[in-house]
Structure formats: C-alpha cells, structure tokens
C-alpha cells in the first residue's frame, strides 16, 4: 500500500513540479505569470491535438514519432502563450496580474473548445478522447524495473517525462545560482533599472525566462494527460493543478530543487484521501486544501524570518519603465 501511495504521489506531483519550475524561472525575471493554469491547459491540448492527428493518419504508429510530435505541439502551444503574455506585459506594459488571469481564462477556453472539437470528430458516446497508443509510448518504463522489487517500483517505474521534470528542476537551480545568465536574470528580477544601467537587456531576459518557463509549465499539462490520465482528455478534468503549481512556488521559496520534494508532498496530500476508508466527501475536500494551508504557513514563516534569499524578487509583478530610471 505504501509503495502504491508513493507512486501515485509522484505521478500526481510531476505536473506541479513542471508548472512550479516554469513559474519560478518566470518570477526570477520579475514577471508574475498567473496564467500558468491556462498555459498548462494549452500545452496539454496542443500535445493531444498533435497526437490525435498522428494517430488518425496511420494504422501503426511509431512510438518515437508519436512522442516527438506530441512534445513539439505542446511546446509550440505553450511558447505561443508565453509570447502573448510577454508582448502584453513587457512590450505594452499591461498589468501583470490582470494579464495572467485573462491568460488562464483564455487558455482554459481554448483547451475546452479544441478538446470538444476533437471529441466531436471521434463521434464518441463518452465526452473524452483516448490516445492510448501515444500514452503507452510516454509511459514506457525501464524494462528491468519490475525485477528490482520495491526500489524498482518506487524509483524506476515511471515514464521518461518524470525524470525529465526532475532534471529540468536541477538544471534550473544550477543555472539560477551558479551561472552568469542566472545572475543577470536574478538582477533583472531584483532591480531592472540597475540591471539596465549595467548593460543587461531587461526585455530580452524577461522574454527569455517567461517563454522558457511557459514551455516547461506546458509539459506539466502534457504529462498529466499522457501519463497520469493514460492518454484520456476530458474538458475541465485538469482541476486546480495549475493553481497548486503556483502555490508550490511559494512553498519552495523560489527554489526549483525544493520544488522536487514539495511536489511529491503536495501530490501525497492530494491522493491520500483516496486510500482513506470510511471518510466523508466533505473530509476529502478538506484534506485537499492542505497544500494551500501548508503554503500559507510557509509564507508566514518566511515573512517573519525575512531572510533575503527566501523572499520573492523585489520587482515581482511590476512593469519596468526605462524612462523612470
């Protein structure tokens, strides 16, 4: 039972890890992107659309080609959403909070529209799409995992996107803390005027961080559909995972490496009610609020301690006007 719960917690947490890692990268540049839920939704439906068209075009799919097409479609859709956000907030200097919320509404609407269109094309009696062949390609685990007992089940029995998510979080941590690019990016997030005076292209770094972060977050949506949901798309099935990813950013105090462990914790809190017997529906919903409660507690503690490295970037959510420098 414990092994099953850990596996489900990891699978539940990977979309949150990808979403939070993308948002951390974005926020380090000073952009507060509350459009992450919508971007994850668009990433998911873009990957689904790519996989759907490929599966419909051939009777025998190539697993590698199915993965590549789905990934490229996901990244393209997520990148487009990131570019829209940057154009509005960096180029046109629109309010970041309003833009992010509008992007979430827009992304969910786009996902439901195209998802509904694909469901109509399948002429299915059930309002969902099943892409089991592409999902099987994504979920392929190491062949020797089943022979290693509990270690193989807990550590080695996942699809490749699980390990990609962890690697991305580790690389982002290294880049932010150990490289010149990371130093410049953090400078832009802390004081864009100072960074601009030092010759750093503020707009370029904001565009770069937000677009890369959006593509990483979009992978979280694709993982949910292809791996966690076994290739099944249903409108509005994504739930509040996008908002949980944003909450995880605060819980992880803007560090992608801490997000790795935080995502598993959040995933565990999300799935534990399923395995609790004799628990009411109201209690299940109450348990599901625990990740947000934990996030609020962490936010209070970090605010009281007021350590600089545990605080959000100083210019987070503020548009940069070079004329004011």
Image (spheres, rainbow, N blue to C red):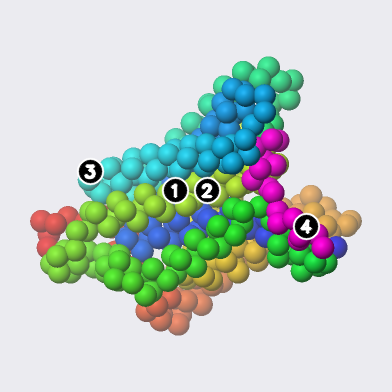
47 part of magenta stretch: no
Q: How would you rate the neighbour count of disc 4 (Cα within 10 Å): few for under 14, some for 14-19, many for 20 or more?
A: some
> Which label sits on residue 215?
1
Q: Is label 1 in a helix, a strand or a loop?
A: helix
Q: Is label 2 in a helix, a strand or a loop?
A: helix
Label 1 with label 2: CB-CB less than 8 Å: yes
Check disc 4 and report the residue beneath it: 273
Quadrant of the drawing holding the C terminus: bottom left
Q: Nearer the viewer, residue 293 or 87?
A: 87
Q: How would you rate the neighbour count of disc 3 (Cα within 10 Å): few for under 14, some for 14-19, many for 20 or more?
A: few
| Residue drawn at point x = 42 percent, y = 71 percent | 174
- Regarding residue 286, the answer to whether it shows in the image is no
Check disc 2 and report the residue beneath it: 219
| Residue drawn at point x = 70 percent, y = 53 percent | 141
Check disc 3 and report the residue beneath it: 92
Q: Is label 3 in a helix, a strand or a loop?
A: loop
Quadrant of the drawing holding the N terminus: bottom right
Cα separation, mark 2 vs mark 4, equals 26 Å
């Amino acid at each position: 039972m414990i092994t099953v719960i850990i596996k489900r917690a990891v699978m539940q947490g990977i979309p949150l890890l990808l979403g939070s890692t993308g948002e951390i990268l974005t926020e380090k540049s000073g952009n507060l992107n509350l459009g992450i839920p919508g971007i994850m939704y668009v990433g998911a439906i873009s990957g689904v659309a790519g996989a759907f068209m490929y599966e419909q075009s051939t009777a025998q799919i190539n697993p590698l080609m199915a993965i590549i097409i789905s990934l490229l479609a996901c990244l393209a859709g997520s990148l487009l959403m990131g570019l829209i956000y940057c154009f509005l907030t960096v180029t046109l200097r629109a309010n970041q909070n309003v833009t992010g919320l509008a992007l979430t509404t827009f992304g969910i609407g786009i996902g439901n529209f195209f998802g509904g269109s694909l469901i109509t094309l399948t002429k299915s009696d059930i309002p969902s799409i099943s892409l089991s062949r592409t999902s099987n390609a994504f979920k392929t685990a190491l062949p020797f995992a089943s022979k290693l007992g509990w270690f193989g089940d807990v550590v080695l029995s996942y699809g490749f996107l699980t390990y990609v998510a962890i690697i991305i979080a580790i690389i982002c941590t290294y880049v932010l803390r150990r490289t010149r690019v990371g130093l410049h990016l953090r400078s832009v997030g802390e004081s864009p005027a100072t960074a601009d005076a030092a010759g750093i292209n503020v707009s370029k770094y904001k565009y770069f961080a937000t677009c890369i972060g959006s593509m990483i977050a979009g992978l979280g949506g694709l993982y949910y559909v292809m791996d966690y949901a076994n290739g099944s798309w249903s409108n509005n099935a994504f739930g509040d995972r996008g908002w949980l990813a944003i909450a995880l950013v605060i819980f992880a105090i803007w560090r992608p490496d801490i997000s790795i462990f935080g995502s598993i914790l959040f995933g565990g809190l999300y799935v534990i009610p399923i395995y609790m017997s004799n628990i009411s529906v109201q209690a299940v919903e109450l348990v599901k609020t625990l990740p947000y409660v934990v996030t609020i507690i962490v936010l209070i503690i970090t605010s009281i301690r007021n350590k600089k490295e545990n605080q959000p970037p100083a210019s987070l959510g503020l548009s940069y006007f070079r004329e004011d420098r």
